[in-house]
Image (tube, rainbow, N blue to C red):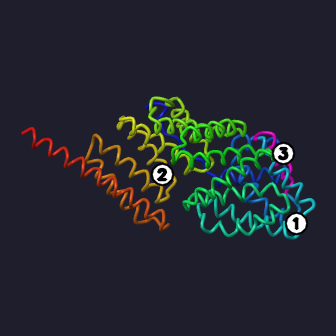
Amino acid sequence: RSAATRPVSLRDPAAYGTSLENAVTAGEPARIRALVRAQPEGARLQFEEKLLPGIAEGKAPQPGTDLLAGAILEVARDRMPVDVLHEAGDATSDWRLAVLAYSSARREYSAYRWKESEPHFRSALPTLRHRGSALAPWAAFSLGVIALQKGKTREAEIALTQIIHDARSRAQPFLEARAFYARSVIAGSGTRIDDAIEDRRRALALFETAADPAWAGFMDSQIAELHAIAGRPQIGWAGRLRALRTAPGFFDPRRTILAFEVVGDDALSAAQPRTSAAIYEEAVRLARELGVADSIADTLVYLARAYAQFDEPRARMTLSEARSWLAQVQDPILKERLKGETSLVAAEMEFAGSSSHSIDQALD
């Protein structure tokens, strides 16, 4: 198998969290630094979701808390944890309540429960802003992404532009990169393709500054996607291959799967259905490893679309399996979207089949 389709394994966020938690509890500098280098995004999330509640409640910090914050600054050039610890030294009661609400929101958001996270972020943000907290731009970013998901693009774009400025002034390159990427989605969905490409280039450079090769590789493929939309499909294949190589490094396993889906979709658009199917097959395998119904259904729909170009019976079997997994999806919004995609692929297959039959009749 080629490097593009060689089997990979997903990250285990829970196992990583346990390892880092043990290292912080024991106050092991070398171990903490190694774990941060291996996964700076995971280290940052561990700080936000696991350590912040105790900090907000005024409990004595774990022996390695300062070491973790320092390692994130050293490796990822991110001041957020260090600055939050400074804030805790002079904490007010409203700051403590806001930080607790923020930490709750982060846990919901990381679990893809965006609707549940929104009220917590909204309750935390005013106080975090008033107190000049390093967490305020992150809360605003999460609300900006939620606004984007709701189709409130103008509101999201204004918020994201401010977050880019705030993150830069606070030395939070990973957040700045995320905000550039989110803003590029708005520009890329309209007619401002060149603006979107520029935002993604900036995001790529910032992800590299933040020592996150998975996100940087993904940006390479996202830049290539925009070139394809602009009628330049030949540009960016090296970036797409880079994305496949770096995708297993994502802390969030769903992003690894998404990275494979994006490149598979680009290959299909470039009239390379067999290459596309090979990439989608890997995405399906990873989704099964993750064991989440919506990821499995989603990847199977993509795979069926590729198979339909050269193996219709296999495409129909794959689409049938996607429907069976779709029945297990709980989120109503996501379920409706997946239903629409499944119906679209089925319609495409029916149209292709009827067109082929009509041509055969005409030639008889």
Residue count near mark 1 (Cα–Cα under 10 Å), binned few <14, some 14–19, many ≥20: few
Residue 117: x and y in percent read 65, 66
Mark 3, residue position: 70
Which of marks 1 and 2 precedes in the sequence?
1
Q: Disc 1 marks which amino acid? A: Gly
Residue 262: x and y in percent read 48, 43
Residue 94: x and y in percent read 85, 70
In this view, the residue in front, 148 or 219, is 148
Q: Secondary structure at mark 3?
A: helix
Whether residue 102 appears in magenta in the rendering, the answer is: no
Q: Secondary structure at mark 1?
A: loop
The reply, left or right, for residue 277 in relation to residue 20 is left
The reply, left or right, for residue 143 in relation to residue 167 is left
Which image quadrant is residue 319 in? bottom left
Q: CA distance from mark 2 to mark 1?
A: 40 Å
The reply, left or right, for residue 2 in relation to residue 104 is left
Residue 160: x and y in percent read 67, 52
Q: CA distance from mark 3 to mark 1?
A: 20 Å
Chief secondary structure of the magenta span? helix
Mark 2, residue position: 287
Q: Secondary structure at mark 2?
A: helix
Q: Disc 3 marks which amino acid? A: Gly
Contact check, label 3 and label 1, Cβ < 8 Å = no
Q: Which residues are magenta?
A: 62-76
Quadrant in which the N terminus is drawn: top left
Q: Disc 2 marks which amino acid? A: Ala
Residue ID at (30%, 48%) = 315
Mark 1, residue position: 58
Residue count near mark 2 (Cα–Cα under 10 Å), binned few <14, some 14–19, many ≥20: many
In this view, the residue in front, 224 or 244, is 224
In this view, the residue in front, 314 or 201, is 201
Q: CA distance from mark 2 to mark 3?
A: 35 Å
